[in-house]
Amino acid sequence: MGKNEEKSVINIAILGAGTVGGGVYKLLSGQKDEIRQQAGADICVKKVLVRDASKERPGYDRAVLTSDWADIVNDDDIDIVVELMGGIEPAKTYVLEALSKGKQVVTANKDLLAQYGEEIGEAANMNSADVLYEAAVAGVIPIIRPLKQSLAGAEITEIMGIVNGTTNYILTQMSETGMSYEDALARATELGYAEADPTADVEGLDAGRKVAIMASNAFHTKVVFSQVYTEGITKITADDIRYAREFGYVIKLLGVARNTDSGIEVKVHPMLIPQNHSLAGVGGSFNAVFLHGKAMDDVTLVGRGAGEMPTATAVLGDIIDVCRDILFDCCGRVRRNCYKKLRVKDISECESKFFIRMQAKDRPGVLANIAGVLGNNGVGISQVVQRSGNGDTAELVIITDRVAEKNFNDATEILGGMSVVKEISGVIRVYDNV
């Protein structure tokens, strides 16, 4: 038994009383006996930091509410700071100050970690402290702890994930019911899956932050959000989904991190994936993470990626883990270790297969002309479908061979200027297991 075996109560402070903060408070209040057995000590919420401590907050003990950070950071009896405020500041300042005071930290703040994860990790290392953040990436799905511990020897080469429930719900509705993007978004908003301003979700920004965090942990190198290529789902149509199904694919918004010989690829974009892939059947607001490693082959983890109680459950798991470290005097044992300095590739250097849908003049020789432009730019054709449309227009749908993004973009720029091509209606990347 460690030297803290006599410690029977571990005091924590929760920063924020929003959806997740409220969920954590409920779990801690309602499962005291079970948590004591799991953690090895009673967990006492000594303070909850809020903007206005005088505001009525049903379910909270008013005695724990404070709007003064000093009440927390200067209280030597508080062992763990649980940061659930979100955003960069003042969360960053509070986390760094807590670590400098010898406190342990649990956070669910993907914005903060995707930008300043290395700085926070170094501060934790310097103070031999824990910083745990399982809930920052995929809600209740365990991914950070496996990457740091159980899969530490797996030499991960690829992570691919559905890590945004809002967009997955929208694409599922479009696929299963034939809804337009606009109607599916309205439905997601009505059910509370989408925020009033859904930009961070539908443009891939939320998923991009999560990919940066996963890539840093999987590949042991610094990756920040600004290095992640992001593309959302706002241009996906029912026609794209219908043709994808015809080719044997489904469309998902995926976060992808790959460790290649020429550098790391980190990107978020819609992708056609085969119907028999483990991620293809993950529907609704569920999330999933697919991993491939040289020593382990494939692993897929599926669960709720957001919501009050799923996210709060992940936070509570981290709190219990930190309590165990405190009791056995081994905080800081799992360090943030970005010991590699790998290059992050620009999207133009990446390679992919592509799905391209275009409207072209319906006359002899047009397909040959289009194929010629693609071929001249090093773009091979894997599959093609041609449908006659109204009047003199035909719809062409092509899936290319694997090609460099730059070559493909050069080809589509030329195609867009051809008199026989009336419109390029859609371009989506296609999963290629390399």
Image (cartoon, rainbow, N blue to C red):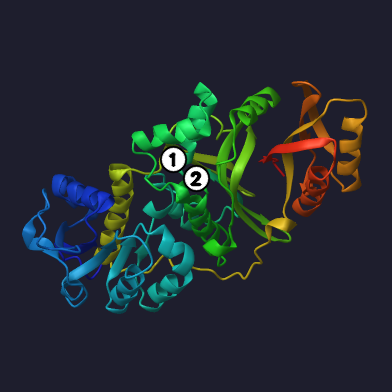
Query: Looking at the image, do the residues carrying marks 2 and 1 touch, with CB atoms under 8 Å apart?
Result: yes
Residue designated by label 1: 166
Q: Report the side of 141 relative to 312 (left or right).
A: right
Image x and y of residue 316, in percent: 28, 52
Assign the N terminus to one quadrant of the image.
Answer: bottom left
Q: Can the viewer see residue 283 in this picture?
A: no
Q: How many marks?
A: 2
Q: Residue at x 50, y 53 (%)?
A: 205
Assign the C terminus to one quadrant of the image.
Answer: top right
Rendered view: 281 above or below 151: above
Image x and y of residue 110, in percent: 42, 58
| Type of amino acid under label 2 | Val
**Quarter location, residue 46:** bottom left
Q: Report the side of 110 relative to 160 (left or right).
A: left
| Type of amino acid under label 1 | Thr
Determine which of the numbered discs, if any, sits on residue 202 in the image. 2
Image x and y of residue 363, in percent: 88, 25
Q: CA distance from mark 2 to mark 1?
A: 8 Å
427 and 245: which is toward the camera = 427
Rendered view: 70 above or below 289: below
Circle nearer the viewer, 2 or 1: 2
Q: Residue at x 35, y 57 (%)?
A: 108
Image x and y of residue 374, in percent: 86, 42
Q: Residue at x 45, y 67 (%)?
A: 117
Q: Can the viewer see residue 396 in this picture?
A: yes
Q: Residue at x 77, y 36 (%)?
A: 422
Q: Secondary structure at mark 2?
A: helix
Rendered view: 75 above or below 292: below
* Marked residue nearer the N-terminal end (2 or 1): 1
179 and 259: which is toward the camera = 179
Q: Report the side of 349 relative to 318 (left or right).
A: right
396 and 75: which is toward the camera = 396
